[in-house]
Amino acid sequence: MNFLPGLELNERYYAEIVGPLLKQYDASLKYSAGLIGYGSDVLGYDNATSMDHNWGPRMQIFVSQTDAGRIEAVKAFLRAHLPGEFMGFSTHFSEKGPDGTQHMQAYAGGEVNHLIEVYEIDRYFDEILHKEASQLTNLDWLCIPEQKLVEVTRGRVFYDGLGRLNEIRAALRYYPIDVKLAKLAAYWNCVDNEEAFVGRAVEFGDLVGLKLLAARMVNLMLKVCFVAKETYVPYSKWFSRGFDDLGLPEIKAQALGVLTENAPAAIESKLAGLYLAVLALQNASAGVPIVECEISDYYNRPYKVIKAGGIVDVLRNAISDEQLKAIDLTLVGLDNKLDSSDFTNADVLGKILRK
């Protein structure tokens, strides 16, 4: 099988096979169809390697609450009527393995074990959001793992017969302005906590410690860029690839310069330049107050810092939601700041704030 990007494959799969079959099942059935959720194909980052599991002719079908009782019948109809392959790709998948994954399997006749998921649309989004998208409060937004927001806003809608799938995705496109400001403040707060440690590592000639600290600062700066560009941060597997999509080659070059430099003083200097470049990008972002900062010494120590605490104060003061303004910034964006796949889809903050 020659590789074909999953979004392209499945848009054709819907148009040529699945859509006509659903019309045959019941022309009056109202539904929406698309490819969203998990998977590199949803992000458009898939390649031939991706074909080994949970990749191939697949999609989601969404129905209304009125038709929720027909979900099993729809899946059964598709099992009985789907062709065994499409464009040379098997539509028949293995059973779930011990790790929960499935892969395309040669079709030998009988029913097709397809990978078309059928959901009641409100239940699908309620499991992620815990309420309707239009009713989310600022704290509700912070309770949603950011990777989940990546998944439900990326991908592609093939057909929106319900007239709601595009509407929900549009409502979730990016955070409200107060949440955006809180996310920025939280990242800069992390910088404030450790930026002086960089100079201390330079002072001691601790290259390993310096590299680790600098890498953390670079990570935070790139995440600030995502917020400034109003783009959800994908988890670590796709973080750098997602950053490329922001269209910031100069900042990426500066980040790479920090990471590849081996002279301690030069690392500190290049990192200071990255702080200023990212702050300039943030200052140009919609709804964000302009913060004027220069690189200076850390009080009486000759460490190059941006004194990020001042940036935090300006951002926090610009938040109009008093409850959000008072939130502990160590909790904001916790799933991203921990940088572990254990927390990619974990409702970490939700479990704390909903108590």
Image (cartoon, grey):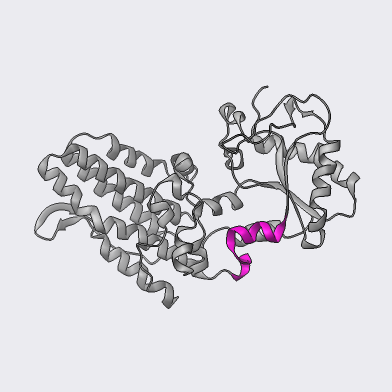
Q: Where is residue 307 in the image (x, y as percent from the top left)?
A: 23, 60
Front residue of 164/119: it is 119
Above or below residue 286? Residue 26 is above
Q: Which residue lies furthest to the bottom in this view?
A: 322
Magenta segment, principal secondary structure?
helix
Left or right of 165 in this view: 344: left
Q: Residue at x 43, y 54 (%)?
A: 335
Q: Which residue is drawn at 21% across and 55% down?
A: 295
Left or right of 279 in this view: 45: right
Above or below residue 165? Residue 248 is above
Tell me the magenta residue range.
120-135
Residue 282 in view, yes or no: yes
122 within the magenta span: yes
Front residue of 23/91: it is 91
Residue 160 in view, yes or no: no
Above or below residue 77? Residue 314 is below
Quadrant of res 283:
bottom left
